[in-house]
Image: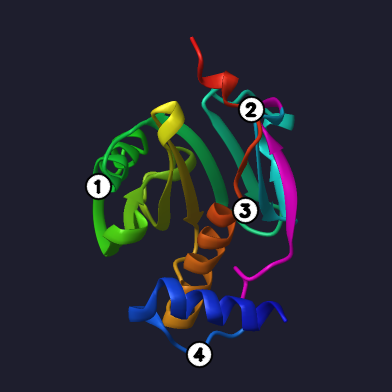
Amino acid sequence: SAVGYYVVTLRRCYGRLAMKLELTGAARLLGKRVLWGGAIQCRIPETFVDVSEMRQIPDNQEVFVDKNSDDSIILELMEIASIQSHFDDLAIANDAISKEIKHQYDDDNFIIGTQSVAKFNDTNPTEIMIFLSIYRLYRADADLLITYNCSKPPNVPDDMNSYALLIKEIRESIEIVDLSIFTQ
């Protein structure tokens, strides 16, 4: 079952977080998505829609938003850097008023953190929980960042773990089909 798979993955990859995992909002059916014109493929929850069908997206990004919430998944091709540097750069890009790393897993290039941002020209900052992971593309000398922006930060550890496992599932599903997009 899907829940059994997630529990096995949690224990293998995030042993320090191993807890009972129940099917929550982040544990969803995943569908294969074609990225960057077919150069890369991965699995994204089926409730997430491709934002490029609605508006212009930078060439180095693929952005998906959940039909049922303000949550988003952003896949972004970047120069190789530490996970901390990518998190700090994201805070700058988001005009974050504050940022905090809650958990960092060096061996997996994975961070769970929060940023306080004013969304959609709102004067009151909103705390966003960010799950950030790196898929390193050594042959292309690039990082593929996977960011899940959770609009309503989970309050219980099991929910946080399910989001972390979703990012892990996305990262493990990445298939590089054509590296020629990295040539200049």
The residue beneath circle 3 is 173
Q: Which residues are magenta?
A: 24-37
Reading the chain from its start, which is encountered first: label 3 or label 4? Answer: 4
Query: Could you tell me the amino acid type at mark 4?
Result: Lys
For image coordinates 74% across by 31% down, the residue present is 53
Query: Could you tell me the amino acid type at mark 3?
Result: Ser
Query: Splitting the image into 4 quarters, where does residue 5 fall?
Result: bottom right
Reading the chain from its start, which is encountered first: label 2 or label 3? Answer: 3
Q: Position of residue 91 (x, y in %)?
A: 30, 42
Tell me, yes or no, if residue 23 can be seen here.
no
Query: Could you tell me the amino acid type at mark 1?
Result: Gln
Query: Splitting the image into 4 quarters, where does residue 109 fall?
Result: bottom left
Q: Position of residue 50 (x, y in %)?
A: 70, 39
Magenta stretch containing residue 115, yes or no?
no
Q: Nearer the viewer, residue 59 or 129?
A: 59
Reading the chain from its start, which is encountered first: label 1 or label 2? Answer: 1
Callout in the foreground (3, 4): 3
Kindly report the distance in space between the C-alpha atoms of the residues bearing marks 1 and 4: 29 Å
Reading the chain from its start, which is encountered first: label 4 or label 2? Answer: 4
SS for callout 1: helix
The residue beneath circle 1 is 84
The residue beneath circle 4 is 20
For image coordinates 41% across by 52% down, the residue present is 132
Query: Could you tell me the amino acid type at mark 2?
Result: Asp
Can you tell which mark lies on residue 143? none
Can you tell which mark lies on residue 178? 2
Query: Splitting the image into 4 quarters, where does residue 17 fall?
Result: bottom left
For image coordinates 47% across by 66% down, the residue present is 164
Callout in the foreground (1, 2): 2
